[in-house]
Each structure stands twice: as structure tokens, then as C-alpha cells.
Image (cartoon, helix red, strand yellow):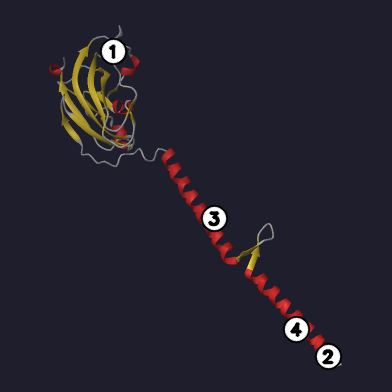
């Protein structure tokens, strides 16, 4: 009888140990999709790595979106206003399209271009050079397009028309950083006071498209 009770006790003790072992194993591992045990610490580290990877991808996506929107083109260079320039002088500009220099090399007067008469009294052909002094590629038509000619600084002037005439060597294409290109701009001019002006369009400065002013002053006697 004692032997039977002893055997039953041993059996119950063994069963208790098996239950305890199974309980410990269940709390120490997590099963993956295939039912294989993976330590909880490894699961946590894997989750963290996936989360960090997602953050990195979001940061890269944001950087790409910023670059594709053109946010990196705006120039961070700062130039003073240049209001007393003449023929042969160079102005430096900072704008939302980059940084560049414009030099007015010479100006000549014409009564007609390609057989066409001017809108006002006569044409002036402006020989100029544009240089990219920024870090981004620029369309060379943008620097030329900021200019206007006027006989009075308190009124608006006429814009460049070089793209409308075949005989005019209009500036076109892109400028890499450090590159420069020479060509011609064309304006229709009114007879007026002795002084004539080429300047940045005031509306572009007011709108924040160009960050500083420049004015070239010349007379008819200086024209070729």
C-alpha cells in the first residue's frame, strides 16, 4: 500500500514539473508565423529596427519632395542695391531663381528691326553678359527678363522683346554655376529726357522675386 501511494506521489510531482516547464517556456518566447519560438528581446529589437527604418524612409521622402519642389534654387547670397551703374558696369543679383551677374557691355540705337517699326520712338539693342554666380543651374532668360527700360524712374517701362525678332541674338538655354553667356536684349524706347534707364522691374522686387535693385543710367550720346 505504501509503495502504491509513493508511486502516485511521484507521478503527481512529475506532472507538476512538466506544467511548470511549459509555463516558463511560454512566457520566454513568442511564436512567429511558422510557429518557431523567437525570444521576446529579439522581437522587440526587430520591431524597433522596422520603426527606425520607416522613419529614415520618411525623412528621405521629405528631402526628395523638398528638392523636387525647387526649394533649393533660392539664393542665400545678399547683395546691396546698385543704383549708380553705367554702360560697362556689372550688377550682382540675388533672387528666388538663384544668384547671377548682369553686365551691360554696350547699347546701340535702331529705327527698325527685321523691317518692323518700334512700338514707341526707336529700338535700343543692349549687348549684355549674364554669369551664374550661384550654386544652382539657372535659365538664362530669367535674368534678362527681370530688366526693363524707362525714361522716368517713377513710372513703369518696356520689357525685353529679343525673343520676338530673328535677327536679335537673344540669350537662351541654361547656365551651370560659374558659366556665363553673352547676347542681346531689345527694348522699344520713348524720346524723353537726356537720361535713360535700364533697371530691375519694381514689381519683381515688391513681390520678392528679386532681392535687390540695380539701375544703369545712360544717354543717347553714349549709344553706338
Nearest to the eye among marks 4 and 3: give it. Answer: 4
| Above or below: residue 213 compared with residue 163 | below
State which tag comes first along the sequence, 4 or 2.
2
Residue 63 point in image, percent of width and height? 43, 45
Q: Number of numbered discs present?
A: 4
Horizontal and vertical percent position of residue 28 = 63, 70
The circle drawn on residue 3 is: 2
**Residue at image location 42% in from the left, 42% down from the top:** 66
For this orientation, the residue located farthest to the right is 1
Q: Quadrant of the N terminus?
A: bottom right
Quadrant of the rendered structure where residue 90 is?
Answer: top left
Q: CA distance from mark 4 to mark 1?
A: 112 Å
Report which residue position mark 3 lands on. 50
Measure the C-alpha gap from mark 4 to mark 3. Answer: 45 Å
Q: Closer to the N terminus: mark 4 or mark 1? A: 4
Q: Secondary structure at mark 2?
A: helix
Residue at the (33%, 22%) spot, across then down = 172
Question: Would you name the residue on which mark 1 appears?
Answer: 118
**Residue 219, position in %: x, y?**
15, 20
Counting residues from the start of the chain, the first of labels 2 and 1 encountered is 2
Q: Quadrant of residue 192?
A: top left
Residue topped by disc 4: 13
The residue mark sitting in front, 4 or 2, is: 2
Q: Which quarter of the figure is the C terminus placed in? A: top left
- Callout in the foreground (2, 1): 2
Near-viewer residue (8 or 215):
8
Tell me: 213 left or right of 97: left
Mark 4 or mark 1: which is in front? 4
Report whether 145 appears left or right of 18: left
Task: Identify the residue at horizontal 33%, vertical 25% (top origin).
Answer: 141
Amino acid at each position: 500500500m505504501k509503495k502504491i501511494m509513493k508511486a502516485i506521489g511521484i507521478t503527481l510531482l512529475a506532472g507538476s514539473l512538466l506544467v511548470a516547464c511549459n509555463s516558463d517556456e511560454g512566457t520566454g518566447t513568442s511564436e512567429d508565423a511558422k510557429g518557431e519560438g523567437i525570444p521576446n528581446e529579439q522581437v522587440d529589437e526587430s520591431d524597433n529596427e522596422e520603426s527606425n527604418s520607416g522613419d529614415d524612409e520618411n525623412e528621405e521622402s521629405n528631402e526628395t519632395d523638398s528638392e523636387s519642389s525647387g526649394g533649393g534654387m533660392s539664393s542665400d547670397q545678399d547683395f546691396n542695391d546698385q543704383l549708380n551703374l553705367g554702360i560697362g558696369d556689372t550688377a550682382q543679383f540675388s533672387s528666388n531663381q538663384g544668384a547671377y551677374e548682369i553686365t551691360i557691355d554696350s547699347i546701340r540705337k535702331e529705327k527698325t528691326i527685321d523691317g518692323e517699326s518700334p512700338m514707341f520712338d526707336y529700338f535700343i539693342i543692349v549687348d549684355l553678359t549674364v554669369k551664374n554666380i550661384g550654386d544652382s543651374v539657372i535659365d538664362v532668360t530669367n535674368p534678362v527678363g527681370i530688366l526693363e527700360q524707362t525714361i522716368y524712374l517713377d513710372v513703369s517701362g518696356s520689357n525685353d522683346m529679343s525673343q520676338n525678332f530673328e535677327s536679335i541674338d537673344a540669350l537662351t538655354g541654361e547656365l551651370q554655376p560659374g558659366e556665363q553667356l553673352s547676347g542681346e536684349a531689345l527694348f522699344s524706347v520713348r524720346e524723353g529726357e537726356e537720361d535713360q534707364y535700364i533697371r530691375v522691374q519694381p514689381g519683381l522686387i515688391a513681390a520678392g522675386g528679386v532681392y535687390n535693385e540695380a539701375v544703369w543710367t545712360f544717354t543717347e550720346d553714349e549709344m553706338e
